[in-house]
Image (cartoon, grey):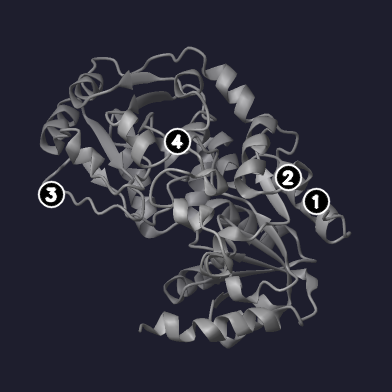
Amino acid sequence: MNTHRLLLPFSYLLLLISYLFPRNNKIWCFGSEFFGNTKYLFIHMSKSQKEIRCIWITEPRNVKKIKDLGFEVYERWSLKGVWYCLIAGVYLYNSYPSNVNLYTIGKAKLVNLWHGIALKRCDRQITVGPMTKIYQSKGLINSLRYLNFRIHPDIVLSTAPVVTDNYSEAFGVAKDHFIEGMYPRCMLLTQQLSDVLSFVKQYESEETNKIVKQLGTYNYVYVYMPTFRDSGDNFILNSGFDFQEVDKVLKSNNRALLLKLHPDSQLKLNNNLENIIMLDKNVDIYPILPFTHCLITDYSSIYFDYILMKDKQIILFTPDKSDYISKSRELVYDYDKVVVGRNATNYNQLLELLGMTSPFFAIDGIDGVRKKFWNHKIDTKDKLVDEIKNRIIKNRVL
């Protein structure tokens, strides 16, 4: 029996005890790796909301880099980390309560800022693939085993009514618990490049700063961000993707391809590729995106975020569409009506697009997609914070 299983009874005991602690609505705990909507709201609030004590809760490996930026941060299972999680009035996270601490939630108000506009079914909508058991299995044992995925947040951040309709079903949360506003991480995509560069210099790693500087030496930059396959299929290699061949095409045109894979992906590249740059799986891609020209993706929510940057291009590389829908996830929307861009259904079509003499092209219908999925009234971080305060601190959580 591993250590996690041995400690599990004590974790559930801590969960029960956590309901006895009074909560301080002036203390907000944020959690996750240092990226996503929580990161951007945390940075903003730490500077502008002096009446709220903002604390980042994370793994030991992240503490130093966040502390060096001047923020209050604690290891999740340190004494201070557990203490502040037990008394904090508000938890803010990117996916699930475990981003902060699942076993200390007690009477804290849970604010799920989420991590994108989903094309694919998620959470309680999943009925295909290996994740079905997490959301569809019955009984008390399974409810406890998958507690992290079964808890209902008090507030969910959405970007438009059509997204609220979808996530209300997916998360099992009534529509009046949603706030419709711009994702904090996406606000960076609408800023001037000079402002983005200032953010990178102040808050991002040396590695990210080097990448941004390097991208300025190319004529054109692609970023390839495919979604993860629940089935575990090695879809990139199965498609016939030839990295050596792509690298030669890019090099001949002084172009670059950034490859940003899901953290669970196991794909490895040869070290002799010159114009293909594989980013660390945990790097925050959002400060880098404004310095790219074209997104290559498939069924990933990054598509909706990327289209916020006007005059960018989109290539849709979907060689396994039918397999993805049958083995990994069903889609929520009609793909062909919602996702627009240049289509490549096989590797040869993709290679042809990558070798175009002029890589710039217009995308018909993208304005309509942008209007539909980014239809909200809250467009600044201050407005978002005020709305959360109105619902939580003033006891308006329904």
Q: Earlier in the sequence, mark 1 or mark 2?
A: 2
Q: Amino acid at mark 2?
A: Phe
Asked which quadrant contains residue 73, the reply is bottom right
The answer for how far apart the CA atoms under marks 2 and 3 are is: 45 Å
Residue 178 circle label: 2
Dots 1, 2 in contact, CB < 8 A: no
Q: Amino acid at mark 3?
A: Asn
Label 3 SS: loop
Q: Amino acid at mark 1?
A: Asp
Q: Amino acid at mark 4?
A: Glu
Mark 4 is surrounded, within 10 Å at the Cα level, by few (under 14), some (14 to 19) or many (20 or more) other residues, namely some
Vertical placement of 171 versus 193: above or below?
A: below
Q: Residue at (56%, 22%) from the top-left corner?
A: 369
x and y, in percent, of residue 114 in the image: 58, 50
Q: Which residue is mark 1?
A: 386
Dots 2, 4 in contact, CB < 8 A: no
Label 2 SS: strand
In the picture as drawn, the residue positioned furthest to the front comes out as 139
Q: Earlier in the sequence, mark 3 or mark 1?
A: 3
